[in-house]
Image (cartoon, helix red, strand yellow):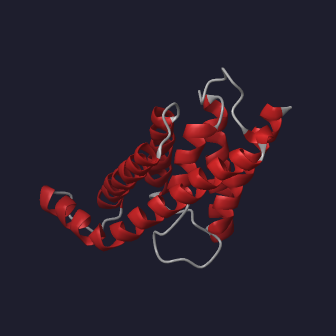
């Protein structure tokens, strides 16, 4: 039964993070990357580690009307963020979580802005156009980084506190950290 309570608490945290997208927030200051990172680091099984954050993301995008031509690059970056979460699953510490959040912010910046350059028609398809696209996106990166760090601290730290307070949420001894 303890595994069921833990899984429900993890899923509740993921969907609560997705719901936070519906609240007013600065551009790119969002819980979505932290949610994907958290999912990869905590959820048992590869299928659920992808399904939970993507279900929450699709639902919140549907409510926000957030589907557009370059959304595939956004979803790809969050799939890669789940993989970063897997990489830190067995060794979660403030340093590894912070490093993973920074890595996911940088990866999101690189992947999504490449998609903007490739498909938006806003920039010439040249090295100079790609450079101009990345330079134009720099002002948004600070909010991405701040949001990823803030929400990673909130999710990972909040769940660590919940595990201390509620024994049923603790990882059973000998159980793998994540798949």
Residue visible at 21% across and 59% down? Answer: 130
Q: Is residue 65 above or below residue 130?
A: below
Q: Measured from the top left, where is residue 47 in percent x and y?
A: 64, 32
Pick out the residue farthest to the right.
1
Pick out the residue farthest to the front.
164
Q: Is residue 51 above or below residue 156?
A: above
Residue visible at 52% across and 54% down? Answer: 34
Q: Nearer the viewer, residue 111 or 169?
A: 169
Q: Measured from the top left, where is residue 153 in percent x and y?
A: 52, 57
Q: Measured from the top left, where is residue 50 in percent x and y?
A: 60, 39
Q: Measured from the top left, where is residue 123 in percent x and y?
A: 24, 66
Residue visible at 70% across and 46% down? Answer: 164
Q: Nearer the viewer, residue 5 or 122?
A: 5
Quadrant location of the C terminus in the rendered image: top right
Pick out the residue farthest to the top.
174
Residue visible at 40% across and 47% down? Answer: 95
Q: Is residue 89 above or below residue 63?
A: above
Quadrant location of the N terminus in the rendered image: top right
Q: Nearer the viewer, residue 123 or 169?
A: 169
Q: Is residue 94 above or below residue 68?
A: above
């Amino acid at each position: 039964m303890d595994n069921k309570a833990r899984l429900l608490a993890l899923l509740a945290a993921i969907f609560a993070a997705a719901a936070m997208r519906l609240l007013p927030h600065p551009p790119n200051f969002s819980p979505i990357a932290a949610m994907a990172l958290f999912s990869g680091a905590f959820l048992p099984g590869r299928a659920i580690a992808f399904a939970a954050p993507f279900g929450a993301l699709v639902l919140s995008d549907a409510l926000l009307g957030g589907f557009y031509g370059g959304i595939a690059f956004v979803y790809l970056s969050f799939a890669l963020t789940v993989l970063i979460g897997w990489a830190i699953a067995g060794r979660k510490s403030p340093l590894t979580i912070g490093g993973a959040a920074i890595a996911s912010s940088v990866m999101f910046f690189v992947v999504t802005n490449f998609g903007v350059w490739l498909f938006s028609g806003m920039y010439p398809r040249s090295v100079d156009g790609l450079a101009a696209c990345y330079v134009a996106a720099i002002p948004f990166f600070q909010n991405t980084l701040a949001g990823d760090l803030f929400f990673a601290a909130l999710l990972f730290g909040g769940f660590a506190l919940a595990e201390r307070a509620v024994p049923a949420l603790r990882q059973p001894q000998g159980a793998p950290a994540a798949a």
